[in-house]
Amino acid sequence: MEDDLVFKALADRTRRLLLDTLFERDGRSLGELEEVVNQHTEMSRYGVSKHLRLLAEADLVTVRRSGRERLHYLNAVPIRLIHDRWIDKYTEPHIRALTDLKTLAETETPAEREGHHDD
Amino acid sequence: MEDDLVFKALADRTRRLLLDTLFERDGRSLGELEEVVNQHTEMSRYGVSKHLRLLAEADLVTVRRSGRERLHYLNAVPIRLIHDRWIDKYTEPHIRALTDLKTLAETETPAEREGHHDD
DNA sequence: AAGATAGGTGACCAAAAGGTCACATGTCAA
DNA sequence: TTGACATGTGACCTTTTGGTCACCTATCTT
């Protein structure tokens, strides 16, 4: 099962931070990414390297050698596939309207939500 | 961190199966979903219930009481947000073209991929 | 009201994932 | 070519997660 790698890769916060960083700007080396990660949390270079490897195996990140450096690029295709898996093309405009509001979770139908109500 | 719940929820294969099932048809009870899961793998009702609870906490699934049953509905909004997080609106058409091909990973630029080549 | 059915919760155990380390390899600059 | 720099790999430990169980509550039917 190949998509498993993608979802497992996305399940870790550090790896999502790496994707965010690469989304902002592509083509960063391991050392550069290590710096960014360490602005948020303490982690060894080995840890960052391991995370990048998982991202590469999931094909969320593409790696290109440039001399002795390895430059990392974001590949958004698997993300797109996740989207397509559970969002119907016909309902997409509807969903987009909701996400643009971004407050739907509370405004939609509060009575529908199974929180703590006993009517 | 709230999005953490979403990604953790998606990281499990059984939960993705549940989402797939609900994507096909909404409004199923726990018992009904248990049956579907058991067509793929052995799992107790408690296990399925636990998975559904995680999906609900991640807001990927909405639950509505109907008598003594609990009906489950797919909520695709978090999926949409994942998409929006790493796919730029301007590059989206480009990505869509690629995903339609679905073979880009191999066809793109094989030399770029850091597999086992020593040129 | 009473039995049957649908579902919820907390504790517990086994499996998997995150993180670190000590090595090693390959490339750039002089 | 040689030293310095950037990075890769496998083993190990700790933490998290998946799964089950026993017991409970709530609702429907008669």
Image (cartoon, coloured by chain):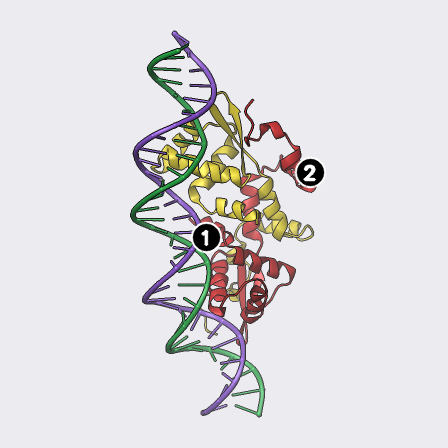
Chain colours: A red, B yellow, C green, D purple
Instruction: Residue B91: give x, y in percent of width and height.
Output: 66, 53
Kind of residue at disc 2 = Ala
Crowd tier of the residue under label 1, counting other residues whose Cα lies within 10 Å: few below 14, some 14–19, many 20 or above: some
Q: Is residue B111 above or below residue A8?
A: below
The circle drawn on residue B75 is none
Circle nearer the N terminus (1, 2)? 1
Which of the two residues, A81 or B50, is positioned nearer the viewer here?
B50
Instruction: Residue C3: give x, y in percent of width and height.
Output: 33, 15
Q: Mark 1 falls within which chain?
A: A
Query: On the rendered structure, is A46 left or right of B80?
Result: left
Instruction: Residue A47: give x, y in percent of width and height.
Output: 47, 65
Instruction: Residue D1: give x, y in percent of width and height.
Output: 45, 92
Q: Is residue B79 above or below residue B38?
A: below
Residue at left offset 46%, top offset 73%: B118
Q: Which residue is mark 2?
A: A97
Disc 2 is placed on an element classified as: helix
Visible residue check, residue A8: yes
Cα gap from disc 1 to disc 2, whole angstroms? 30 Å
Q: Which residue is mark 1?
A: A5
Residue at left offset 58%, top offset 28%: A112
Disc 1 is placed on an element classified as: helix
Residue at left offset 54%, top offset 24%: A118
Quadrant in the picture for residue A117: top right
